[in-house]
Image: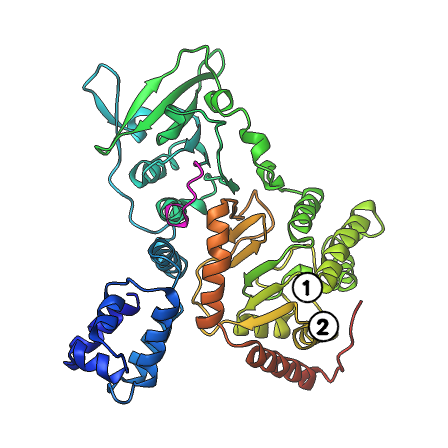
Amino acid sequence: MDLIETFLHLIDEHGISQRAVSQTLGYSSPNQLTRLIKKQVSDNLMADFGARLLSCAEKLSLSPGEQQAIRDCMSDIGLGSDNLSAYHRFAALLQNPSMLPSAAIASPISLVFPGSREKVTLKEFFRDASRLHITACGGCHAGLLQSLQSLEQQCELSVDYYYKESNSALQCVAMLESVWGMLYKPWFHPWLIRIRNSGGQHGLLNAGVMLVDAVYPAPDGDIQRSWILVSLSSGEALCIPLPDAYQNLSALILPSQETASTLPMKSRISDFGNYLDYLSYIRELEHNHRVFHIKRDIGLELIPAGIQQAALREGPMGSDVAGTPLEARLWEVQNDRYLNSLEKSQHQYHVFSYSALRDFIRTGRQSDHFWGFRSFLPHERLSILNDLYIRATTNHHFHLLFLKQEQCIVPDEIVWYDGRGVCFILPGTDYDLDGNHSEFLIEDKSFCQFFCELFRKRLCERWVYSELVSATMLKRLMDELQAETGFLPQHEA
């Protein structure tokens, strides 16, 4: 509810007339309150109305909870109904575990065919395919997208997702709601959910369509067939077969698809060299950009490269990489990341879980600890925390915050890179994309602006402790570690 809706609810609960409230708030005419209720005033006058309600809270017998509700509504003034709706839906998405892959699946969509009354489900139609690659674009509705889950146990499935620029955070959030549970599936690969600009083209690609490339085993070699599935409002999808000559339909209709996806994860990271490619990509995202990072515990970019190098050399793969170009490259990339985080003048926000950081100081292992590193030693942990504390208390561009509720956010990691996108990572993911790695990046400009200007501010106001309180909590962890180990903190460069 906005401020006016909350106000009307409160006076109804307390049995107070609008005329009596108008007099209590000091308005010279009841018409002033009438214009406020009709929302025919400026944001400044609306904010003044909220301030008057709070100043007269005792006279109006408003409880502390009711006063807080008014304060919450005042922070929404000027945001607009679409942004407010987007925020509430997105916040619920982040906090509601039922939106993850275990969510109930909608009824299967029926496929219909030109010139035929036959209807069949996706699972039935593609029952003989050994591999399916599906490119979903446009405004595919939730039922059609969720029906993809019926195929995952049947064949080798891969899915890419693209959608049109909407200039609406609300539309982007609605898109996320429809695919949220699938974004973390190993076969669903929207590593880059981005604006698809068709260069002024209209028609088919502006509808909700799926481009399906299917491979069927045959004695003389695999056979490939392609279809276009067009979403219909009736809960059905029109299935249009393509002539045999049109193979690899996705590449034919979306020729820029592969170049549009810049994440090296697209090729699957399965060895240390490719892991370094991934770190190099992250370095480019972070470099001299504002960053808003929500993570259970400390990220590698905040750990001095010398400590990382020691952990690698003494880790399970140390003898294989020590003194090699791979080790030198790791040190170069991670040192660049650390120094850029240390020296850049752009603001960076790091939000941690207090209990997860406490686990780190006790075990020396991060929640997503890289398998090639040994555990960080006690004196290294103390140096890492001391470095964080110095930054948090002396660098006005560095903001360290602890979550008030440990489990209030479902994704294990959320990173907003200014001008680049918003990245989401599932809890329990690791650095091996052939294993259990689930990550995607949203580049949509309207959504990124919404995330920065709306969600970041509201999260920092409502979900985390202040920077002063958070610094005190961090110092408490340092004292705890120092008392247990007897080490004195030393700053690592």
Q: Is residue 132 above or below residue 316?
A: above
Q: Residues within 10 Å of mark 1 (few under 14, many from 20)?
A: many
Q: Which residues are magenta?
A: 163-171
The image quarter in which residue 288 lies: bottom right
- Indicate which disc residue 302 carries: 1
The image quarter in which residue 396 lies: bottom right
Question: Of helix, strand and loop, which one carries label 1?
Answer: helix
Q: Amino acid at mark 2?
A: Asp
Residue 45 on image: x %, y %: 35, 70
Magenta span contains residue 170: yes
Q: Amino acid at mark 1?
A: Leu
Residue 437, visible in the rendered structure: yes
Q: Which residue is mark 2?
A: 387
The front one of 47 and 75 is: 47
Mark 2 and mark 1 residues within 8 Å of each other at the beta carbon:
yes
The Cα atoms of the two marked residues, 2 and 1, are separated by 9 Å
The front one of 249 and 137 is: 137
- The N terminus, quarter of image: bottom left
- The C terminus, quarter of image: bottom right
The front one of 87 and 350 is: 87
Q: Residues within 10 Å of mark 2 (few under 14, many from 20)?
A: many
| Residue found at x 23% / y 79% | 22
